[in-house]
Image: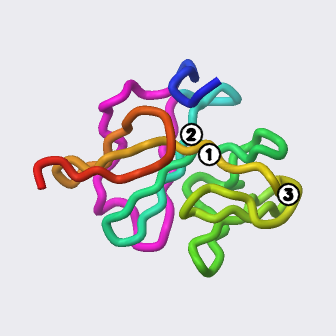
Amino acid sequence: MGWHDHPHAPPIGSVLCSLASIPQHGCKEISYGSGDSRFGLILFRRNDDIRAYVNCCPHFSVPLNAHPDEFLLLPDDRIMCAWHCSVFRLTDGACEQGPSTGLGLDAVQVSLVGGNVVIGRSGAPSLSVEGA
């Protein structure tokens, strides 16, 4: 099942947030729905490059964070799962160490449109700037 098949996933073209609301070299959590069936995204920003992943550790299918919008960020643009300590690269979603080694985060393509981050089609995360 791809991210777009999740019952609470926003439709392609939906504005997720403003670029300014994502801290430099930091993450922002976006959620749709509630409880166990919610759909969560992690948006990572490095300058104007935005990467998006489904907020779900592939090891145990839980969000990477233990508290809303708080992540365990490591040097070199990496993130650690708060539950079982798998470490993922935010540049490509690959797991470097821990129980999820050999697995990766599910990427969601996003675009930057007029200062807003917009959800795109499924596939590798990338940034396309429209109107530039």
Give the magenta-colored segment's residue range: 9-32
Which residue position is annotated with label 1? 55
Residue 65's label in the rendered image is none
Residue 40's label in the rendered image is 2
Looking at the picture, which amino acid does disc 3 mark? His
Query: Where 120 sits versus 20, above or below?
Result: above
- Residues at circles 2 and 1 in contact by the CB criterion of under 8 Å: yes
Which residue position is annotated with label 3? 84
Query: Where 26 sits versus 1, above or below?
Result: below
Q: Residue at x 48, y 34 (%)?
A: 122
For label 2, the SS is strand
Mark 2–mark 3 Cα distance, whole angstroms, equals: 18 Å
Quadrant containing the C terminus is bottom left
Is residue 38 left or right of 123 when viewed as pictured? right
Percent across and percent down for residue 57 are: 73, 47
Mark 3–mark 1 Cα distance, whole angstroms, equals: 14 Å
Q: Residue at x 68, y 57 (%)?
A: 94
Is residue 64 left or right of 84 when viewed as pictured? left
Quadrant containing the N terminus is top right
Quarter of the rendering containing residue 84: bottom right
Comes first in the chain, label 3 or label 1: 1
Is residue 98 left or right of 36 when viewed as pictured? right
Between residue 17 and residue 44, name the one nearer to us.
44
Query: Where 2 sits versus 64, above or below?
Result: above
Looking at the picture, which amino acid does disc 1 mark? Asn
Is residue 74 left or right of 132 when viewed as pictured? right
Q: Residue at x 59, y 52 (%)?
A: 68
